[in-house]
Image: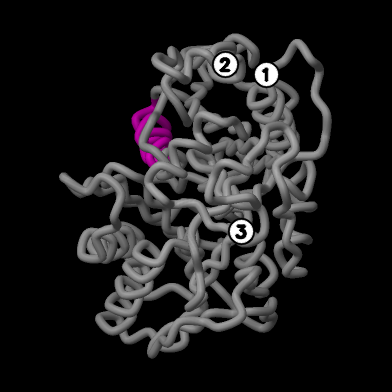
């Protein structure tokens, strides 16, 4: 079976447009979180958000503009001048037809699910909604589509824009942090929301190699698991089972780095750490570096997986593990380490990405640097 590779990555974050800008900010330990400017957050628990400062045309919904900017970068990185015939587009995110209070939000109302297919001028568009694990669930579907021969390539893309409705939804479940998020810190308070766009181009190695695109980022293993009955809380047993399944799918026992989902909540971060410690114990891993990007740009919800993959790709290619911004007093660990600064000198062949969402959505990806 031929390898599936990620030949292009595109991002828009609070660090600005571009994957390079994001990686530079992340490795420097910069925090792009600050007060909300587009709506008043004073009535809510959390006040720090990762806003994109760039303006967009008034006629284009922000989340659509962010997504299309990310798609342009990903396609350019993949050395594509046009998408091959039959390319599928998988939009990750919210339902294309909002209802209830969301329908009153222009950002929600104007952003239609099938739009990327038409705007990109390609074939059928699919829609995946698995909360904050949507990107990795979409990648799982993309891999099946490509391996089946149904499409030569798949673009996974999405956008998110800060708005009062989503903000209030997280405030109701008391998930928001009063201060900028501090994943894995003993004093962590919760989530800081962010916004932006993300896109990935996936294809067979041979298909990418024919035009000289990068083929070093291989989707080695991928697992998706549902934890029934878990509306908000993470289940560490399901998380560890998901991680183990991804390792098994990749045919490896260990990785050299884990990019954690870690949003900054007490329960979620603890469950993920316990799961990682368990997997390390089973596989004989010691001093596994684990970090999260969400203290830098906030939580991008359904497209957070793209930011996680971009950070992991940079670590695999350079051997430098990114820190967790905002982490000053790490949780006590025995088999994993929690870097507070960028750590060079980690020769990596495999790395993992965790992505979890409300409603019991869990996914783990193993990447190989070929």
Cβ–Cβ under 8 Å for marks 2 and 1:
yes
How does the figure colour the protein chain or chains? one colour
Marks 2 and 3: which is nearer the front?
2
User: Is residue 94 placed above or below 177 in the rendered structure?
Assistant: above
Q: Badge 3 is on which residue?
A: 313
Q: Nearer the viewer, residue 367 or 278?
A: 278
Residue at 74%, 55% in the rendered image: 32
Cβ–Cβ under 8 Å for marks 3 and 1:
no
Determine if the magenta segment contains residue 145.
yes
Q: Position of residue 66 (x, y in %)?
A: 69, 30
Report whether residue 75 is seen: no
Q: Badge 2 is on which residue?
A: 111
Q: Secondary structure at mark 3?
A: helix
Q: Nearer the viewer, residue 330 or 273?
A: 330
Q: Which residues are magenta?
A: 137-149
| Location of residue 179 (image quadrant) | bottom right
Is 148 placed left or right of 176 in the picture? left
Q: Nearer the viewer, residue 195 or 174?
A: 174
Q: Quadrant of the C terminus?
A: bottom right
Q: Earlier in the sequence, mark 2 or mark 3?
A: 2
Kindly identify which numbered label has been placed on residue 251. Answer: none
Q: Earlier in the sequence, mark 3 or mark 1?
A: 1
């Amino acid at each position: 079976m031929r390898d599936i590779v990620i030949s292009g990555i595109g991002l828009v974050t609070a660090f600005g447009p571009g994957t390079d800008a994001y990686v530079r900010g992340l490795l420097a330990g910069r925090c792009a979180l600050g007060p909300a400017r587009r709506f008043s957050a004073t009535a809510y628990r959390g006040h720090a958000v990762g806003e994109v400062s760039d303006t967009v045309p008034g006629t284009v919904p922000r989340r659509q503009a962010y997504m299309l900017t990310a798609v342009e970068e990903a396609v350019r990185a993949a050395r594509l001048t046009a998408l091959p015939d039959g390319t599928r587009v998988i939009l990750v995110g919210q339902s294309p037809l909002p209802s209830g209070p969301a329908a009153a939000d222009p950002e929600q109302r104007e952003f239609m699910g099938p739009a990327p297919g038409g705007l990109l001028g390609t074939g059928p568009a699919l829609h995946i909604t698995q909360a904050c694990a949507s990107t990795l669930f979409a990648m799982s579907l993309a891999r099946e589509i490509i391996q089946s021969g149904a499409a030569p390539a798949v673009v996974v893309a999405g956008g998110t824009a800060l708005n009062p409705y989503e903000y209030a939804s997280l405030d109701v479940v008391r998930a928001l942090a009063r201060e900028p998020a501090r994943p894995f810190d003993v004093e962590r308070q919760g989530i800081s929301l962010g916004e932006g766009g993300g896109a990935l181009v996936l294809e067979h190695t041979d298909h990418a190699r024919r035009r000289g695109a990068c083929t070093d980022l291989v989707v080695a293993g991928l697992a998706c698991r549902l934890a029934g009955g878990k509306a908000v809380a993470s289940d560490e047993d399901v998380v560890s089972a998901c991680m183990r399944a991804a390792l098994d799918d990749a045919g490896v026992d260990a990785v050299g780095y884990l990019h954690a989902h870690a949003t900054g909540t007490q329960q979620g971060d603890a469950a993920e750490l316990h799961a990682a410690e368990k997997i390390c114990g089973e596989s004989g891993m010691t001093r596994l570096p684990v970090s999260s990007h969400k203290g830098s740009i906030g939580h991008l919800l359904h497209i957070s997986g793209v930011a996680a993959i971009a950070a992991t790709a940079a670590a695999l290619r350079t051997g430098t593990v990114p820190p967790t911004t905002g982490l000053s007093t790490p949780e006590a660990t025995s088999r994993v380490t929690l870097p507070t600064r960028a750590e060079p000198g980690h020769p990596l062949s495999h790395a993992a990405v965790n992505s979890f969402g409300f409603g019991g959505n869990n996914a783990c990806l193993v990447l190989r640097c070929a």
